[in-house]
Image: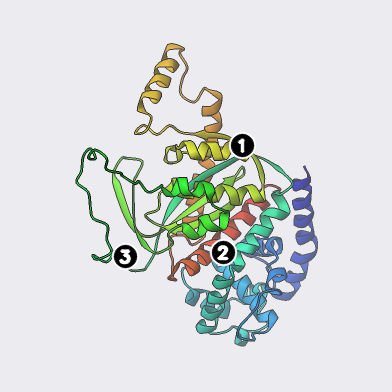
Amino acid sequence: MKLHASLSRSWLNIQRNLFPWLKEEVGELTEKSKWLITILELVRVEEFVSSHNSKTGRPLTERSAIVRSFVAKAVYGMPTTRVLIDRLSTDNQMRTICGWTSKGRVPSESTFSRAFAEFSEDQLVERIHSALIAKYLSDKLIGHISRDSTEIEAREKPQKKSQVDVTEAKPKRKPGRPKKGEEVIKENSRLKRQQDMTLEQMLDDLPKVCDVGSKRNSKGYKETWTGYKLHIDAADGQIPVSCVLSSASVHDSQVALPLAEITARRVTNLYDLMDSAYDAQIIKEHSCTLGHVPIIDINPRSDARLKEVLEAEHKRLKITNFSMPEDIRYRERATVERVNRRVKDEFGGRSIPVRGHAKVMTHLMFGILALAADQLIRLVI
């Protein structure tokens, strides 16, 4: 109720005060313009730009207008900065909303590019999104956190795996049973190593370069792409709470622990919902240590017998699909799938005009920020 009341006050303030003032300045507002204004008022990027350390001596008001323009770019689904600048040059209403006093004040594409690089280096958008979630959800009890990833295609050349020098490479042993007295040392998997790591160490250990990823689609066919993988935790209401960007080849399970730690620092939730890619005992135990109830689909390759037993038991008891309490809750995992789809279809996730992990993450986070604000607004209208 407090969340609804807080958002309602913000929405009423925008409707009663801001919309009439802007109408006098730029004329009748379109529905899209009203939506952009509402999102900008909710995220309040100006409060974070004031503490942003600019390396170019750019005036504070101009830096604020640049960030607002990038948010508008995500809201309107513009593919490139060039399109954004053209729109700002011709659309007086949008230009005023973003903070530019005249057409001549809109900077060049190179200025936008330098500013974007600064924002990426300082993780400005990530901090704005984290503050938005903390402001509206930190003191609320979230029922379900749904976890999943989505492929992000990039316009980059995939980086090849570094080849170890032949002189330093360890001699390969023959396959099969080891000889008597031969000691075989197995390197711990990343998931096991993460058990003894801090959040910062886990994030640093994740591969972040552009490479080739693959997965099987819903029809069972293998798909490959070049780029990255965006891992998202979404709360009830399709609100993205936390995100991590990794190389495309990274398995979903390797990002489960750091993503869960980030989410736990921002919100309090009861259930963690994940598909069969996260079916690992370490992930289940970690979820329990955070005070959550993990509901994870069974991976048929790792636990086929258990799945057969459960299906036989359901049949014996005449239990139809999705009639068990866990199955009913598991349906809520569709929340994160809708978030993935909206990020890519509506907020620029399918068109990545930049290169490099930091810049790609910033581009995606502008969309995540706009989506989170959009979903919060939908709670009250």
Q: Nearer the viewer, mark 3 or mark 1?
A: 3
Classify residue 295 as left or right of residue 14: left
219 over 232 or under it: above or below:
above
- Label 1 Cα crowd, 10 Å radius (few <14 / some 14-19 / many 20+): many
Left or right: where 193 falls relative to 272: left
According to the picture, the residue beneath numbered tag 2 turns out to be 366
Residue occupying image coordinates x 50% and y 75%: 81
Decide which of tag 2 and tag 3 comes sooner along the chain.
Answer: 3
Q: Which residue is mark 3?
A: 162
Q: Secondary structure at mark 2?
A: helix
Between 47 and 188, the one nearer to me in the picture: 188
Amino acid of disc 1:
His
On the image, which quarter does residue 2 sit in?
top right
Give the residue type at disc 3: Ser
Instruction: Please give the label number shown on residue 292.
Output: 1
- Dot 1 or dot 2, earlier in sequence: 1
Taking depth in this image into account, of 55 and 16 the one nearest to the observer is: 55
Residue 352 visible within the image: yes
Q: Give the structural element (helix, strand or loop) at label 1.
A: loop
Could you tell me the amino acid type at mark 2? Phe
Q: CA distance from mark 3 to mark 1?
A: 39 Å
